[in-house]
């Protein structure tokens, strides 16, 4: 096999609880990752030597800062692989949107290199390499549609089953840096106990499985919202508007993208048109995946 084209999916965080700061400087998180049908397309081609990445998106660096190149370098150093690779990235996931696009591309690169070069890297090997590339990367190495993330978000508990629900994304014209959101987080207030939060996260999944969106709406908390909202007040305006008629709406990851779930696709498309008309923002309609 000389070339391979893979889809690199986006995720939303159905909820994101910040539990505190860890001695290593990262935050301790409890989150529920969910794949959605929004995907980048990545074409990989084996070459004799060297590495080349092409991407037309103006905000995606095509040099050593790109997570695709970082993943490739990690594979090389880990396996001693001599060959080269050419990659063409068709970027559709909004950049710095809280949808994990770069992390997903990194995971896809690990999977592609493993297959193209017959490296026989095991799932635990890949997960360990994914963790080195970023806290969101391991989720995209799983085949599951939904998983609980603990620790930095990289200690994963896959959840069985997928739910067919429509998703509306409200996209903002510019992204937010994940680092700056975490840096401007105020000290978490004393909140519910860990036992309660663990229970809430399971309940979200149970409500989703039965398409009980009212039930899950009260639990879709994102502790990064306040910090992201300070940087981009428009997030709050969109969210308040959506929640009037669509309670299962929240910000994904470190924002700014806002997601909104519903059972009905036609109604979701109508809500998308309303958001575009009222706020002049781009939207995307798809499904949980
Ligand atoms: P997070 O995983 O932190 O939620 P995000 O989804 O908000 O990330 P990304 O789209 O992954 O954000 O982009 C974050 C930054 O990473 C961008 O500003 C970009 O400069 C850089 N970057 C590096 N590689 C990639 C890539 N393959 N795709 C998109 N951005 C990349």
Image (cartoon, rainbow, N blue to C red):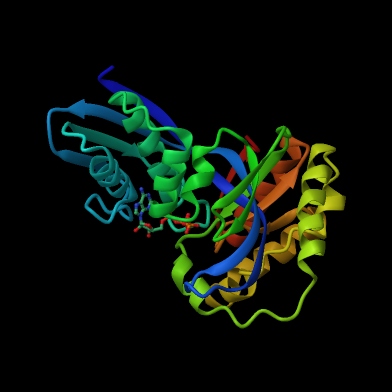
Residue 50, by quadrant, is top left
Image x and y of residue 136, in percent: 50, 52
For image coordinates 36% across by 34% down, the residue present is: 42
Image x and y of residue 47, in percent: 16, 28
Front residue (pair 5, 167): 5
Residue 208, by quadrant, is top right
For image coordinates 56% across by 71% down, the residue present is: 228
Image x and y of residue 69, in percent: 27, 46
In this rendering, the answer to whether 260 lies above or below 218 is above
For image coordinates 49% across by 77% down, the residue present is: 183
In this rendering, the answer to whether 124 lies above or below 149 is above
Report the number of numbered marks: 0
In this rendering, the answer to whether 252 lies above or below 90 is below
List the single residue furthest toward the left: 49
Residue 269 visible in the current orientation: no
Front residue (pair 261, 32): 32
Q: In this view, does 112 lie to the left or right of 269?
A: left
Residue 289, by quadrant, is top right
For image coordinates 69% across by 63% down, the residue present is: 239
List the single residue furthest toward the top: 1
Image x and y of residue 131, in percent: 44, 52
Q: Which quarter is ligand 1 in?
A: bottom left
On-image quarter of the N terminus: top left
In this rendering, the answer to whether 204 lies above or below 76 is below
Residue 273 visible in the current orientation: yes
Q: In this view, does 256 lie to the left or right of 92?
A: right
């Amino acid at each position: 096999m000389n070339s391979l084209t893979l889809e690199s999916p986006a995720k939303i965080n159905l909820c994101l609880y910040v539990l505190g700061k860890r001695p290593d400087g990262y935050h301790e998180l409890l989150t529920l990752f969910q794949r959605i049908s929004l995907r980048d397309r990545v074409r990989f081609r084996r070459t004799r030597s060297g590495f080349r990445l092409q991407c037309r998106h103006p905000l995606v660096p095509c040099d050593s800062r790109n997570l695709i190149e970082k993943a490739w370098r990690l594979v090389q150093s880990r396996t001693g692989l001599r060959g080269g690779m050419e990659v063409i990235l068709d970027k559709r996931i909004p950049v710095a949107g809280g949808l994990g696009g770069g992390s997903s591309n990194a995971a896809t690169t690990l999977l592609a290199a493993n297959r193209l070069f017959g490296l026989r890297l095991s799932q635990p090997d890949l997960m360990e390499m994914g963790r080195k590339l970023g806290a969101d990367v391991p989720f995209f190495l799983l085949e599951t549609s939904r998983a609980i993330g603990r620790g930095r978000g990289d200690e994963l508990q896959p959840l069985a089953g997928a739910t067919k629900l429509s998703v509306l994304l409200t996209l903002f014209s510019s992204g937010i840096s994940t680092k700056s959101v975490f840096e401007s987080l105020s000290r978490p207030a004393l909140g519910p106990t860990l036992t309660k939060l663990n229970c809430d996260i399971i309940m979200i999944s149970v409500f989703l499985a039965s398409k009980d969106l009212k039930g899950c709406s009260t639990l879709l908390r994102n502790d990064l919202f306040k910090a992201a909202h300070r940087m981009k007040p428009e997030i709050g305006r969109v969210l308040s508007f959506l929640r009037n008629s669509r309670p299962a709406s929240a910000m994904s990851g470190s924002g700014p993208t806002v997601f909104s779930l519903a059972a009905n696709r036609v109604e979701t498309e109508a809500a998308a048109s309303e958001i575009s008309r009222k706020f002049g923002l781009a939207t995307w309609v798809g499904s949980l995946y």
